[in-house]
Image (cartoon, helix red, strand yellow):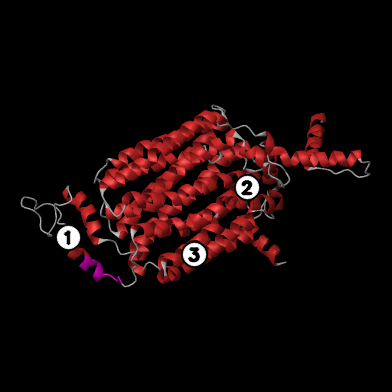
Amino acid sequence: MEQSCINRVLQRLFGKVPARISLGALAFLGFVVMTSVRINIAVAIVGMVRQNASSALTAQAQCLGGNETRWTDGRAKEGDSNRTIFPTEEQVEQGEEEEDQGDMLDWDEVTQGLVIASFFYGYTFTQIIGGRLAEKYGTRITFGICGLTSGFFTLLSPVAARSHYGALIAVRVLMGFFQGPMWPSMHALVPRWIPPLERSRFIASVYFASNLSMMVTMATTGVIVAYLGWAAAFYIPGTLCIVWASFWLLLVSDDPSQHPRISSEEREHIESTVRKAGSSRTRPQKVPWRDVFTSLPFWAIIIPDIGNVFGLSVYSSHLPTYMKNVLGFSIKENGLLSSLPFLCRYTGANTFGALCDRLLASKRISLLMCRRVFSAIALFFPAIFCIATAYSGCSATLTVIFLCLANFTNGAIGSSILVNYTDISPNFSGTLFGIGNTFCSFMMFLAPVCVGAIIQGQQTMSQWRKVFWACVPLYALTEVFYLLTSSTDVQPWNSAGEEEEEEKAKEGKEDGNCTTTITPLMVEEATKELNNKE
């Protein structure tokens, strides 16, 4: 009774809005809030931890004076009266003491890297099971639980950090464990709800909300830390995450046929188009594991995604630290400038997504060629701009421009590699995405540790140049592999579950049973025959 009242109210408010648009809006917000609680620590940790004053002084002096020894006593050398005077180490420490430093933590770079990476220790191990849970039981409950638990563990983070860095690592491992199903579960929903010619745009606008979230989180977290303290940077997004999850669980349906407010025209349009693309009416109960892991088109997606995720992890995890320790930006400036590349990635994803769907609808380009062209844009160009960033020196303007261009072009990944899972196997796309994301997760927690190992307490331009160079071969070589081995054909093992149903029905007939098991595939074939006769 209560649910029907809610449906009537929602029908009056949003009755003219297509159901898949409402679904996309809720999913968009889900990616925003869950990404926020995942990456907010990358900015918050700048305000949580006491930085090594002499190290920061040395790195920033390079960019202000041209070499590491230009400013040593707080006075400009003769003839340099127009230059900015860089403070001494004593002045830096005095400035920090003027701020509220009583709540700051003494963690070295390696410890910070472990804390940032700890989320992915848990995140790695629930990708595959998350995809399977969504395929069998639905994305509504799987995705909703991800949101509830993410919010809860975020609220616990400040208490854990103050007690011991190991406690914070444990909390973030648990958060990652429960948030692992997030992406795979949504990928299980796409083939059931989104027509094929709309999938690039849907993935760009919804999935890449995570990049929009990175932008907003990095821009606002610095301000929150500066004015409210670093603990507030966890309390605010954690609360928002729990509120969103409550609405998601209340309003979302796993299938168009189950949606109480969808129009009959929209339901028929969705169901007819997704069936033609290879989606089954029934939920797949058994995964053909051997066929999946021996499928070259499947590995063609995973390999370049690994290269892509390493570079993205370097940007999202350590860009704020680079901005502060090398380019010398304050915590407030840091958040805004660090967020711009992710705004560009979201813009690029939507630009390339719309272009891809338009090209496919016009039939000017084949599906396979479309995936390969956009994947080349997504990986080759960031490799080039990584090199440019490495040699942009102390120019903050050039650094930000190159990082923005790298992320804008990388947005094409949504129109190529990410959507390719639904091309080769709509029925198992959640599981496939989970497998792929499991491999990628190793890069997510390996990248921050690698950066910490390269830097080794030396916040210098030369050390950071090595970090940027490390991304280049992973981008380029993995993309070459994709160009040589990728496919968009629906794989034979995609219909494994349907074949089993047909075999059971035939066995029933051979045994002389009076009743016959009617499968969804049989109904669909009978409908086609009837339409042909008419």
As helix, strand or loop, the secondary structure at mark 2 comes to: helix
Q: Judge whether residue 99 is colored magenta.
A: yes
Residue range (magenta): 93-101
Q: Position of residue 27 (x, y in %)?
A: 56, 53
- Residue at the disc numbered 2: 188
Side of 196 where 45 appears, left or right: left
Side of 265 where 373 appears, left or right: left
Magenta part mainly helix, strand or loop? helix
Q: Residue at x 28, y 43 (%)?
A: 398
Q: Position of residue 114 (x, y in %)?
A: 41, 57
Q: Position of residue 328 (x, y in %)?
A: 25, 54
- Residue at the disc numbered 3: 171
As helix, strand or loop, the secondary structure at mark 1 comes to: loop
Q: Judge whether residue 86 is colored magenta.
A: no
As helix, strand or loop, the secondary structure at mark 3 comes to: helix
| Pointer 1 or 2: first along the chain | 1
Q: Is residue 244 above or below residue 414?
A: below
Find the residue positioned furthest to the top.
364
- Residue at the disc numbered 1: 87
